[in-house]
Image (cartoon, grey):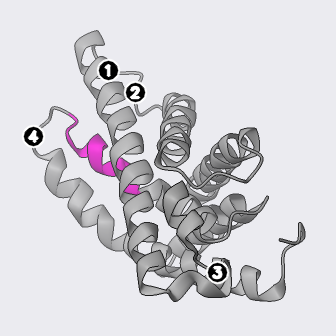
Amino acid sequence: MSKGLKLSEILVTILIAIVFSIIYNIWNFVYKAFQVSGLHIEEITYGAWFMAAVVAYLIIPKAGIALLAEFAAGAGETIIMGRFDIATMIYAFVQGLACEIIFAIFRYKSRKAIVAILAGLLTAISTLPLDFAYGYLASLTSWNLILYIVFRLLGGILVAGLLSYYIVKALDQTGVTRLFRPSSKEDYDNL
């Protein structure tokens, strides 16, 4: 597999980002619906906003794909919102970078579930300092903050990690991803 990105890989990554930018905007309704509880259960759903990077990498396991996908999805999200939002762009960049760190640790060679889970977990962790910086967490009491953090981390693991993994695994079984990675028995065994 070549190390550089091909035009087709970049275009598919942008296409993935566009799909996720639409999902991100729709997902806001899901997030808000869970917010009603007041116990931060909505943070379990927060991992959906990290999925573009994980899905793109699992389809095209190359350096830079996760960052490109997440940043482009964040940019697309602001376009769909109809307003330029710097915070969304910062979050998208940090989230893509966090995923890239995990994928780089595995030398962009592993597509196993544990890699997707670790990427989702680190991405969830990476958003917490931004939440503090933007003042979302400063007013929470200790028990409430703990719930917030635990549910956010679970969202990274379950939604961004496992759900992304199973989505790509299903795509692999349909043959859609053959353009980028010919599926073989060894590919399925590595999943």
Q: Earlier in the sequence, mark 3 or mark 1?
A: 1
Number of the front mark, 2 or 1: 1
Q: Secondary structure at mark 2?
A: loop
Q: Residue at x 43, y 52 (%)?
A: 160
Q: Is residue 179 above or below residue 83?
A: below
Magenta stretch holds residue 169:
no
Label 2 sits on residue: 137
Q: CA distance from mark 4 to mark 3?
A: 45 Å
Q: Is residue 14 above or below residue 63?
A: below
CB under 8 Å between discs 2 and 1: yes
Q: Which mark is residue 37?
A: 4
CB under 8 Å between discs 3 and 1: no
Magenta stretch holds residue 43:
yes
Q: Earlier in the sequence, mark 2 or mark 4?
A: 4
Q: Tell me residue 35's x, y (percent).
A: 18, 46
Q: Tell me residue 186's x, y (percent).
A: 58, 64
Q: Earlier in the sequence, mark 1 or mark 4?
A: 4
Label 1 sits on residue: 145
Q: Earlier in the sequence, mark 4 or mark 3?
A: 4
